Image (cartoon, rainbow, N blue to C red):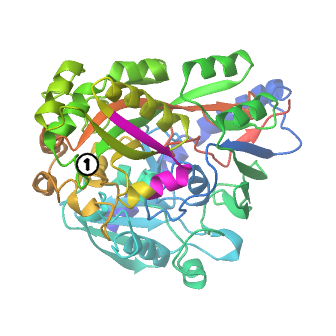
Amino acid sequence: MENLKQSKEVREMTKCKVLVLSVLVLLFAIGISTILAAEEELAKEQVLRVGVSAADIGPMDPHQPNLAQDTPIQDAIWEQLVAFSIPGDITSDIESALAEDWETSEDELVWTFLLRKGVQFHKGYGEMTSDDVKFSFDRVTNPERSGKVTNPPWTFVDRVEIVDRYTVKLILKDPVPDLLMYLAYMQNGAQILCKKAIEEKGERIQTDLIGTGPFMWEKYRPNEYISLVRHPDYWRGEPILERITYYYMESEESRTIAFLNKELDSMTGVPDQAWIGHIEQAGGIVDALGPGFGGEFIFNLSKPPLDNWLVRAAIAYAIDREEIVEAIGKGVTTAQYSPVPEGWLYGTYEDIPRYEYDPEKAKALREAAGYPNGFELETFCSPRVYYKTRFEVIQAQLKRVGIDLKLNVVDHTTFHANQRKGLSSLILFGNGGFNGEMHLWQFWYSASIVTKPTGSLNFSHYGDVVGSIDDILEQAKGQSPEVKKVLYAKAQRKILIDLAGYPLDNQLVPVARQPYFDLGYEPRGTTTGAWYNITWQSRILKY
């Protein structure tokens, strides 16, 4: 631990060197804050009301695949060892969070984390220690309890060792150069859970969640709302907001009306350029947050006739991506041509089959597949704008080439549940994220097939029924980012050659807020995939 101690000493020296400058800056800031005090006066009631695009709560266990509607709540309750320096911005630096320092061995196989002392769990569950970190990491790497065990970095974890109460070692099978980024990304399952709380309440995490985050679970009323209250013993300082209430309002129209009437302070938005213009004209603020949702049209290869490549190719050539982009709005979405969108980590558009729109070719392939008079397909559809708009455009496009797609519209939770059960023939999934490596392991690794105990997000059954990129993913383990880039580009090309899925578009996340809702930082992106990353500094200004 000598290097770790030296690292801390250097940081302390640096703090001393800037102390004088900090005092001067503070004195200047006091003067400025006095001038601006009237403009930044806080509202008497620090209660944040959020309209959520969902009918009800989904699975809340952070070690299971989650719905976008729930991740903002989880982000307020649980924390990771490290964090992005700007909330939600995956391009920002990695900073300390529950771990105040760390070091790695020369071979990058042993990572040692020094935990922050005095961090308190919610509701009197005591101090977070190495026991909680080991418990959390053992749990997320256990295939019997985790749906994320096939995700990087968990595929590379050998074991977790406790050194002492505040020191823990994460020992890897292969080097993971981007380990800290993985641990900072909340949707990867790196949250630190309370061992004592789970042992008392049971393994199934759904309500009365216990974390170290700035807000604590207060109340849940099914199909109506969830409320969180400030964590008074939060290690960064007591949050400004007293309470956050998330109202379940699946109807975009209902949320919009409530927002315009100032009955909501923020809402999950509608991916539509006209809607954005309407909100902004009314005085609201709309933030289009990246890195966005990579929209994939996935073929369930276990369901005939989708096990026939000619049928899948006919569907691919019948789809016009640009028409989908026009229907949604060019201001919020762009066409996507690869399983991992360009701009994401390891995303590529180089040397990949695109299956550009060609309805005549689609008809010829349909006939070659043995369906001269066309055929019918049936699948499930969510009522949410994101899914319904895309499905309806694709439905019309397939109709032009003699393919009749019947859409069974069910509530959003049932829609996702049916996909996970393997009941849907054509799956539409908006994957919020930025990490192409994690995406490939989640969606296309055979152990990630949704109906398997280790299932994650492989809805296509790719790797069992048709094709496989397992060997490519295994080969990439422990490789440098440069080598991984080549291998993952090869994997993306093979997925498209096998036509396990058809990439549609990459859409930014529109979120609306009232001018008086101050996040405490300038929003650049989101790691929740649905709403802002809330912080202890978020506040309601007087209005």
Which image quarter: residue 277? top right
Q: How many marks?
A: 1
**Numbered disc 1: secondary structure:** helix
Q: Position of residue 272 (x, y in %)?
A: 55, 24
- Specify the segment rendered in magenta: 404-417
Residue behind mark 1: 440
Task: Indicate left or right for 325 with 33 as reference.
Answer: left
Q: Residue most toward the bottom?
A: 200
Q: Residue most toward the right?
A: 44
Asked if residue 415 lies in the magenta stretch, the reply is yes
Task: Indicate left or right for 348 with 52 as reference.
Answer: left
Q: Position of residue 297 (x, y in %)?
A: 33, 39
Q: What amino acid does circle 1 point to?
A: Leu
Task: Kindly identify the residue that appears in the image at 81 percent across and 32 percent down.
Answer: 262
> In the depicted view, which residue is nearer to us: 263 or 459?
459
Which image quarter: residue 285? top right
Task: Indicate left or right for 249 with 327 as reference.
Answer: right
Look at the image and tell me whether residue 134 can be seen: yes
Vertically, is 189 above or below 324? below
Q: Position of residue 107 (x, y in %)?
A: 17, 60
Asked if residue 179 lies in the magenta stretch, the reply is no
Vertically, is 399 above or below 408? above
Task: Kindly identify the residue that appears in the image at 25 percent across and 21 percent down.
Answer: 357
Vertically, is 415 above or below 170? above
Which image quarter: residue 183? bottom left
> In the depicted view, which residue is nearer to us: 379 or 156?
379
Task: Kindly identify the residue that appears in the image at 43 percent across and 57 percent down.
Answer: 418
> In the depicted view, which residue is nearer to us: 54 or 360?
360
Task: Indicate left or right for 211 with 380 as reference.
Answer: right
Position of the N terminus, as image quadrant, is bottom left
